[in-house]
Amino acid sequence: MASMERKREIASPFAPRRSAQRKTSAEIVNEARQSLRTLCTRRPFTPRDGHRQLFGESSVRANRDNRPPSAFSVHARNFDAPDSRPGSGTRLSPLDYKPKVPVPYDAADPVKAHPKPPSLEAKRGAVGARARLLRAGSLTTLPPVERRTDVKERLSPEPEQKQQSAKGKDSGPPSPDRTEDRSAPPKPGPRRTASESRITQPDVDSAVRPTERGAGPRTELGNGDRIVSVEEDAESLAWNNKVAPLLQELGCMAAGGPEDSVDRLCDLCDSLHGVLAEQDMLGRRCKRRAGILRTLFRLIDLNSARLNLHIAELCLALCVSGNNLLNICKLILKISRSESNDILFQNNSIIDSLLGVLSSEDVSASGEALLYCVGTLKFLSGNSALLRLLLAKNCIGVAQQLIQRLHTPSVQGDTQFTIAGHILVQLTATLRNLADHPDSRPLFVSHGVLSELCLVLRHHHDDQDICTNIARIYSKLSSYSECRLALAQTPGCYQLFIELLSKHQRKQDLVVRLLFTLGNLTSKSDEARELLFGCEGCMDTLLRLYRSYQRGDDPHAPPEKDPQSPGEPRTPPGSLREDEDVLVKLVRALANMCIHPAVGPVLAADAACVQLLMQTLELRSVPESEELLVNVAATVNNLSFYQGESSVVRHNRLTIAKLMLKLLLSSSMDAVLEATRVYGNLSQSKDVRDFLMQNKVYQFVVTLLDSKSSDVCFSACGVLTNLALDPPSRITLSLEGAAAKLADCLRDFGPGDWQLAGQVCQSLWNLTEPGGSERLLDTQEREALLEILTMYLDEEEALQWTASDDMRDFHRACWELEFLPVAQKLKNRLLQPLD
């Protein structure tokens, strides 16, 4: 009896080992060819957006009135008159109360709609030029070039009261940041040395902040109540000699506006940028910054993308803010919407400037500007050359920092949360594009972006646009081990994915990518399989999805209510092919999960799960749903490994065996292989073996031995090993030529696959049981088989076929544990004389 049990164990290699002891060497080797296998599938296809829009047609924001526009016009009149006073760099919080000032609106001149600053006439008796110095500048008037004689006149030692004695007369040239009034000629005065230029007087605002005066060493000369600054004198000289001539030429050319002047205007903008950088006048340090900006704003109406990009680059270098920053970001976005303009972004610092805006601007104060800034990067990241440039400029690191700032308490109000959501749509879409490049993967890991994105999902779980973009990022990166490990180490990610699947179950493009990610996470990790299965509502959610998407292809299925969040718009079902893709990814996740020894028996005993799998096998055809049926068969094969009393697969083994016939008889070798593997497990039962013999399935299995695939031959050998347990079947198999084909497999595959060689010997051992087909082997066949066995049993002879030194130990273990015992017994049997 004991001998019979040992024989049955050898004859049933697909039966699970139930020993709780430590794994033997043979079991370790067997893991190299597990009957429980993970599945592979294609990553969901993301179509390329041919139209560059902030929110595409599939966006849930497409019909919302409160989303920022994707298309707009930007003209010079949209910009605010720049303030000539440099900012202090300190941002003040906006007041809740906004006083209403009755200001008449002039459509012809929007600048006039703003109140003018109070005149100093009442205080100081200033008239003429003094009043004009306080007048708001016009965007359409160029700042005058400060002449040397004007500088001398401005440095006149006469008291201020004497300079203003002639009412209506201008005491000096207008500020370069103001519109020049040519109605009064300059009043001559005594000459001054160059070192006395830029004199400040009491009670007159010099437009210099105290914090800005402290920068750098300088010499000040006292002269009564006037102070002469050498630093200010140097700035005036640089302005007069270098900056003002460039502005003058820009203004003259802008007034003419011929198309052939664009090249010259771009060169002038570059020269101006270089001069300002050389003189340390970029940012908000330049005291005549307002005049520069007015000139640049006027050039925008020439409507040249190349020129406007130069203008935008310079404006960002001058640190525009508020409405002007918003309009500059809009201008850049408008340029980037055309793919033909991508080349304009490659050889300048505009991308650095955009990343600088993202790094420095406050979300609550400049949220809309940041939105258009990130939108530009999203468009540009669709270009492969610019994508590499963005990676080189640390775009991923900047994005990670911006994500953190978007989660601060200051942006958690309703309005700020909404604009943060709009920004995150663009930012996650940018990261989605960056994830396509291989060089991005270590950056996503090192900057911790994968974990940050999980935090975004928790905060914006209702936003389908954000969730879908992040799911696309995960589906791309989770195919790679280092990214998969980083994501798996994020606390609570499995529970989060299950909750999102439950919440957005009819959002097909989101669901399919989350399922693909879960399939990737569970493909290599037993810990991931157990954690996912242990999530609250995991199986309920997965099976509800299974029913929902399978029902979309089954018109006879009864309707079922899908639990959805209140107020969530129902997404119409996608095409049948899209629904099937969801099922492919879902079934793959189930197949991977049931590999875990604690999860597999539970799933095998889950009647709802097994019934859905059987329903798919019944409803689908191989030509139309090949990948889905192959995945379902592989899942059934994994579940059939667990043959406990509670196994639903075991109780439905005959029904499953019948359903597998359509796969075995198909033209798909993948389907045939999976069906054969299922038969290898199910044929441990006598009723299944009888079904296979009665329906002549054995003929197809014997034919599979002619395959050039070692996997197909191995699976066929497993079925034949079990069929040969029954004496009546041995004769039938031998008459079908099974023994000769098995010998051919041993000769062809033995040297390179000792596991297959051992399985072939096991099949031959069962076939040659006494009273069976050993009498049907003629002398020539027996001698040929003995010659092969003798050669393979010689250790030195057998191991010389080892592919490499690295594989030698593995080959030796397989030879010793998988092949040697059964091959030696088979040889001894063949050497016995026939009765």
Image (cartoon, rainbow, N blue to C red):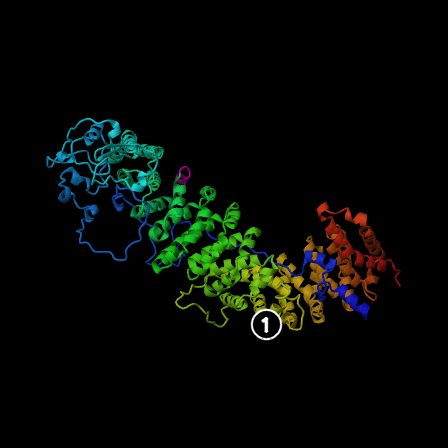
Q: Which residue is mark 1?
A: 607
Return the x and y of residue 616 as percentages of the image width and height: 56, 66
Secondary structure, magenta segment, majority class: helix
Residue visible at 37% across and 52% down in the picture: 363
Residue type beneath disc 1: Ala
Return the x and y of residue 408 as percentages of the image width and height: 40, 56
Is residue 670 among the parts visible in the rendering? yes
Name the quarter where the N terminus is drawn.
Answer: bottom right
Q: Please identify the quarter of the rendering in which residue 694 is found.
A: bottom right
Q: In front here: 472 or 404? A: 404
Residue visible at 62% across and 67% down in the picture: 659
Q: Give the vertical position of 413 relative to 359 (above or below).
A: below
Name the quarter where the C terminus is drawn.
Answer: bottom right
Q: Please identify the quarter of the rendering in which residue 297 is found.
A: top left
- Regarding mark 1 in the picture, which secondary structure is present there? helix
Return the x and y of residue 686 as percentages of the image width and height: 72, 70
Q: Is residue 345 magenta?
A: yes
The segment highlighted magenta reads 340-348
Q: Give the vertical position of 669 relative to 353 (above or below).
A: below
Is residue 804 among the parts visible in the rendering? no
